[in-house]
Structure formats: C-alpha cells, structure tokens
Amino acid sequence: MTGSGPGPAGQFRRAPLRVRWGPDSLESIGEALERSGRRRALVMTGPSLGARRDLWRLLDAATAGRVTGIFAEVRRHSPVDAVLAAVEAISANRTDALIAVGGGSVMVTARAANILHAEDRPVRELATHRTSEGFVSPRLNAPKLPMYAVPTTPTTATSKAGSAVTQPGHRQRLAFFDPKTRARTIAVHPEFVATAPEELVLGASLDALCMSYEGLISVSANDWSDSALIHAARRLSALLQRQEGLSAGSTRTELALAAIMVGDGTDTARGGLGAALAHTIGHDHNVANGVVEAILLPHVLDRVAAHHPGRLAAATSMGISRSERVPQALDSLFRQLGTPGRLRDIGVGEDALADLADAAMSDFAVSTAPGLPCGAEVLALLRAAW
C-alpha cells in the first residue's frame, strides 16, 4: 500500500429534475401540476412576454387552466423592489405553484420571491454573507412552492438553486441558496425560445460558456461536474459558430439544453472569480453578465488559474492539446463572435476599478476561485482587462 493521509473527500448530490424539449414539452408542466394536486399556478415573467397572449394560450392549454395569474414585472438583474412586488403577487393570487417563463432574471426573481414569501423575514437576514471565517449561508428551512421553468434564453439559471438580488445604489448583490427552489420540471419549447432577441441569446450563451470553464477550474470541481461541463462547453462553442447563426430554432433549443447542463454542473462545482466580477460589473453598468465575463475569462485563466489542472479539461473541451493555449483560443472565439474586448468598451471607467474589485470580493462565487485571490490581485486583473 502506498501513499499517506485520508485520501480525497467530497460529495455529489443531484435533485430530481425533469427536462423536456420540443413542441409537446409544456405538457410536462401540466402533468407535474396535476400529479402534485396544484391548482393555482402563478407565472412570473417580464413585460414583453407578459403581453404575448398567444404564448399564454399555449401554457393555459397545457396546464388545463391551472395558471391563475401572471406577474409580468420582472426586471433585469432582479432588483429587490421587483422581487418584493412578486412576493405580494404570490400572496394575492393564493399561489400554490410558480412557473418562471423567461431568461435568467426571471428565474432568479422567481426563486428569490419564493424564498422571501416562505421565510417571512427581512431580506438581509436570509442572504449569504461574509464573515472573518468565510461565507455563511443561513438555513432556509420553510417549505417552498414547487417551481417549474420555461426558459426563453440559454440561461444557466434555469436549473440552479441559488439566486441573488440587486439593490439600487449598491454594487454588492444579496445572494440566497435553497435547493427547495430548484425547478422540478423544465420545458424548452420552440415558440418560447424563439421570442428572445439575438443579443440576449448571445449574451446568455456567452455566460453559459464562460461558466462552464469557471466550473472546470473551481476548487469544488469533481468528476460529475467535469463530465457535464466539458460536454456543455464543447456544444456551446460549436453552436455559437454555426453558420445559420442564432436565429435558427433548433440552435436555440440546443443552446438552452447546454446551458441547463452548465447550470446543473456549476451548482456542484460553483462559480469563480470571473462570475463574481461579471455579477458586480453587469449590475453596476447594466451590461449582460456574459458580455462582461467574455472580456474577463482569458485574464482569469492567465492570472488566477495559470497552473490549475482544470485548464487541461478546458483544452479537451476545445479540442486543443496544450492547456496554455486555452486563454488565447477563448479570446479568439470571443473576437470572432464580435464581443467587446476591453472593459472600457462597455463603459467601465478606470476610476471605478478599485471599487468594483472590492465589491466583487463579497460575492459568494469568489469562495470557489482557485487560489482565493486577494483584493490586490483582483484589481490587477481588472486593470489588465481595462
């Protein structure tokens, strides 16, 4: 017998999840509502989708009239006042199930509203916070309403258990984690994924691709998360480079499925420094998180994960043999897709970098970044990306 010490340690848990795609996919939500005896489902969505009566007729037919209300006031980056308005709508509708229809902000708002409605405590008491010993997530023990999801963009948020809300005038987000708010059934329907503008599809796809690589270099990465993330990264990269572009319905469905896989994989592996910075800068400058992370990820890989074994997994997903080529290969792909190359290109001022670095260090995603970078290292990275 060779070696010493107790050996590797870890855990893997997967919540029950059903994913169905295609023209009949909405029926899976109707079937789930019927099995669980739910009669008063509230739809959460944004204003533009809220006006699409044709889509609600499809959902109403699939659920046999179990949709009894539509909350269409979700806003980008899930500001806390919109979440609190959603909580009021849950109570007013006497809701017994939630159906989130839309992109990442819709999924996050629905989960956060579910938590606030059930726990009935002030927002800050429920949020993950940083102490001298690290990040602490309060126990959220109250039963939650069952969640179902119909994504319209390739958002990783569809299959996650975490959620985070923003506050006007504050760069830090308030994050919550509750496995009971994971979607039980996800329906990827062609009529719904066709609604998103190409700009939103690209931004969400970039976010999913970047998160797949961040998951591979996370300190919480494992064989299960790697298998999902390597495959998803390969699929996302190929789909983004398809000649027919992002308007094709089949491409949008496949992108959504790959993003769901990334969400599931990173729920185990967690995020990283690029995600924390994208959350902070995206909210502060009203830019899609995926666009921000596409600027930052090559710098993260070079500066924070230069020798991390996850880079070899990333190289495998890209079909290249040398892990040191991964940042350059990603940068080339992002430029090919026409994304901005510098933080200054999206309106970030050089004088804001120090405050952004400080705010990002309070984001929970930092806790699983390799090497646990300090504030000075984060600021140096931002300056390099500026």
Image (spheres, rainbow, N blue to C red):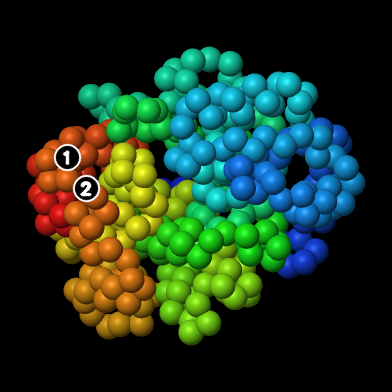
The crowd level at tag 1 (other Cα within 10 Å; few <14, some 14-19, many 20+) is few
Q: Position of residue 243 (x, y in %)?
A: 48, 84
> Are the residues tagged 1 and 2 within 8 Å (C-beta)?
yes
> In terms of depth relative to the viewer, which is nearer, 205 or 366?
205
User: Where's the C terminus, which quadrant?
Assistant: bottom left
Residue 304 in view = no
Q: Mark 1: which amino acid?
A: Ala
- Secondary structure, mark 1, is helix
Label ID, residue 231: none
Q: Which residue is mark 1?
A: 352
> Could you tell me which secondary element the residue under label 2 belongs to?
loop
Residue to which mark 2 is pinned = 348
Q: CA distance from mark 1 to mark 2?
A: 7 Å
**Residue at 56% over, 72% down:** 247
Total numbered labels: 2
Q: Which residue occupies the foreground of this view, 93 or 326?
A: 93
User: On the picture, is 196 further left or further right than 209?
Assistant: right
* Relative vertical location of residue 265 with respect to residue 227 in this rendering, above or below: above
What amino acid is labelled 2 in the image?
Val
| Residue 156 seen in the current view | yes
Name the residue at 70% across, 57% down.
187
